[in-house]
Image: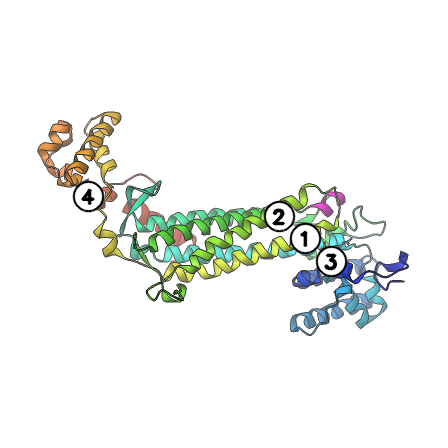
Amino acid sequence: HSGKAWGGRFAGGTDPRVESFTESISFDARLAPHDVAGSKAHATMLAENGLLTAEERDAIHAGLDEVLGEIEAGTFPFRTELEDVHMHIESALTEKIGDAGRKLHTARSRNDQVSTDLKLFVREACDRLDELLADVQRAFVGRCGQDLDVVIPGYTHLQRAMPVSAAHSWLCWVEKLDRDRGRVRDCRARLNESPLGAAALAGTTLPIDRDRTAELLGFDRPAANSLDISSDRDFLLEYLFALTVTATHLSQWAEEWIVWFSTEFGFLSLPDAYTTGSSIMPQKRNPDVPELIRGKSARVVGALVQALVLLKGLPTAYNRDLQEDKLALFDAHDTVVACLDLMPSIVAGATLNVAKIESRLEDGFLDATALMEHAIRAGVPMRTAHGVIGKLVALCEKTGRRLADLSDEEFASADGRLVSGGSEELRSVLGAKNAAAVLKSYGGGGREQVAAQVERWRGQLGMN
Ligand code: ARG
């Protein structure tokens, strides 16, 4: 027959093009540590239930360790005709230990095996992502102290809106990344049911103990429906979605900093190590790393869509289409890991060009809303105050002035209540820095609120 593990009912061989078309070893070899962990747990359980002797189990365990050692050392011979990581490991094991190796696949299918491997991979990936996200959060929080008193323009519609502490912007990303960590945690918690023992799709007639393999592999319990679990890739979709949201956040951050790095904004300098030059224009310094973080997010979004489309037409239980899930998973995971890995150095290494920011801070009437709220405090109805300040802004625009340049008389003639508390009180809200200083509400961009949030994050991220 064909010499394949599944070759018993085949008379002829496989077309070599089919072998290279159907192989997955070129990308699933990285599942080897998880495959070995799953096989060791399976063998332990088989021995406890009389399906292997203790000697066979020990030979399997030792043989699997040896195979994994060779894979990790790069000395393991990969052969396309062995299809995937599962077949490679099993056949190498059998070469080493003989018949005991031929018993390992008792009460198991590659279908529950690959699900188990993938869940173990994603579980570990979730933990790694959580650490990397926390490192980025710490980089942002780490510069809040130095930037707390730098007031920057806040924008809506990319138009100057209200002034905020620069640290408020850093914590904006910390919050987003914290929700990302929550999504990853949710994914990890929900995936933690063991597929092992679902076998091909229906379970087995043999006396296995699925609770035991679940326990050995750190799963909370065995999954309750073998048909469901052998077709379940929800965890993969959830993880890809979590990655996609993270990639989207990183892309938004990158876009903002790219804009801030432009000559027109000039808010930021980026460290030499994270910018690159032009092959023709000698003066250039380009934010390539943020640009590629923005660009690579496309691949992650693509991977999520790829997985959704892959899954949507599949009947239950295993279909070979599922083999393609790993390509999307690995690419998205590696992409986000590579981005997150670079971010802390960029975030920590950037400097705010305070002089440049301040030289234009009074452009754009960042204090208009604070002035309106001053009027509200003096008893002017909000809508009336909005109209009054709007007219003053128009007057300033026409005469080339800022709100702080207007005289008490001009304010009084717009609405007497603006000066009812005296000139000093009025002037205490004018100018961007003053307007930022009077922001009071919880979660807002004023210094006191932001300082409190920085403290909270320092505690939460173990930075004190
Ligand atoms: N290489 C396969 C995959 O990645 C493993 C499962 C194969 N199962 C099967 N019945 N052909 O999905």
Are circles 2 and 1 on residues that touch, CB within 8 Å? yes
Within the displayed image, which quadrant is ligand 1 positioned in? bottom right
Q: Earlier in the sequence, mark 1 or mark 3?
A: 3
Q: CA distance from mark 3 to mark 4?
A: 67 Å
Which mark sits nearer the N-terminus, 2 or 1? 2
Where is residue 70 shown, x and y percent of the image?
A: 69, 72
> Can see residue 462?
no
Amino acid marked by disc 2: Gln
Residue denoted by label 1: 324
Structural distance between the alpha carbons of marks 2 and 1: 9 Å
Q: Nearer the viewer, mark 1 or mark 3?
A: 3
What SS does tag 1 mark?
A: helix
Q: Is residue 146 visible?
A: yes
Measured as percent of width and height from the top left, residue 128 is found at 54, 58
Q: Earlier in the sequence, mark 4 or mark 1?
A: 1
Marks 3,4: beta carbons within 8 A: no
- Amino acid type shown at disc 3: Phe
- The residue to which callout 3 is attached is 21
As measured in the structure, the alpha-carbon distance from the residue carrying label 2 to the one carrying label 4 is 51 Å
Residue type, mark 4 in image: Gly
- Left or right placement of residue 300 versus residue 394 in this view: right
Q: Is residue 270 above or below residue 307?
A: below
Residue identified by numbered label 2? 306
Magenta residues, start to end = 226-232
Give the labeled residue for mark 4. 431
